Amino acid sequence: QQQVKQSPQSLIVQKGGIPIINCAYENTAFDYFPWYQQFPGKGPALLIAIRPDVSEKKEGRFTISFNKSAKQFSLHIMDSQPGDSATYFCAASIGSYNTDKLIFGTGTRLQVFP
Amino acid sequence: KAGVTQTPRYLIKTRGQQVTLSCSPISGHRSVSWYQQTPGQGLQFLFEYFSETQRNKGNFPGRFSGRQFSNSRSEMNVSTLELGDSALYLCASSLGRGSNYGYTFGSGTRLTVV
């Protein structure tokens, strides 16, 4: 119930492609869904986040699509660039105001070739 | 603005020893969380401190402990080290409790137990 399932494990696209990473959850109490980007040797960095009352959110080339009924959410990277090559993690948490526990997906290693 | 600082960056310890890792949050941030990252288990929540009190704890044995000081700096301690404790330990700080504030991760301490 506390798990967040992420797929695919790895993804290879060419520059300009639109990689899509999917996540699914079971616990309907989750109310915050962030995506993190991690480069080798660095900690995860917050990319974009969404709450269940919104079906889509865009920030620059990054878009989250959220399907509350299916309990799924996904990250789309428009016009992907070699600099986007990194590991991406989806996450979820419960309680916007009184908890600091993030449940992470298993990660997707993205490689963008020129 | 300085980010989250974790020291040391790398550490090699022998089985049975104990280790202390340090985290200095972003100035003004009062919440500090710790996560363990391994290739097999991914990112797992260890514990969260706010106002010098542990507010939340993950599913780790009692060998893992932590504390937070009045200046919000935090330390985590692992006693009686096991080979399986080899991991990247990440600290994340936030202005307050809850996902509304967002989390900023440090670059981590890479612990190797031999």
Image (cartoon, helix red, strand yellow):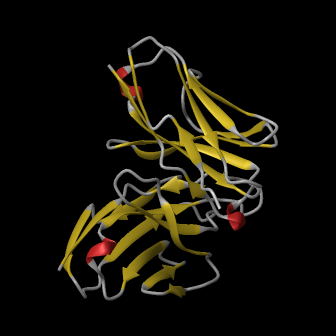
Residue B66 image-quadrant placement: top right
At 37% across and 71% down in the image, what residue appears?
A: A22
Name the residue at the top extreme.
B16
Q: Residue at x 72, y 59 (%)?
A: B98
Q: Please state if A76 lies on the left or on the right of B102 as rendered.
A: left
Across and down, in percent, residue A20 comes to: 33, 78
**Nearest to the observer: residue A85 or residue A58:** A85
Please tell me whether residue B87 is drawn above or below residue A36 in the rendered image.
above
Q: Up-down: is B11 above or below A19?
A: above
Q: Is residue A95 left or right of residue A106?
A: right
Residue B89 at x, y = what percent?
Answer: 48, 39
**Quarter of the image where one finds residue B13:** top left
Q: Quadrant of the C terminus of chain A?
A: bottom left
Give how far across and how far down residue A25 sits, in percent.
48, 63
Q: Is residue A40 above or below residue A15?
A: above
Instruction: Tell me if residue A99 comes above or below residue A57 in the rendering.
Output: above
Q: Residue at x 53, y 52 (%)?
A: A2
Tell whether B106 sits left or right of A51: left
- Please indicate whether residue B72 sits to the left or right of residue A12 in the image: right
Q: How many marks?
A: 0
User: At x 79% / y 41%, what residue is drawn?
Assistant: B71
Residue A43: give x, y in percent of width and height: 46, 53
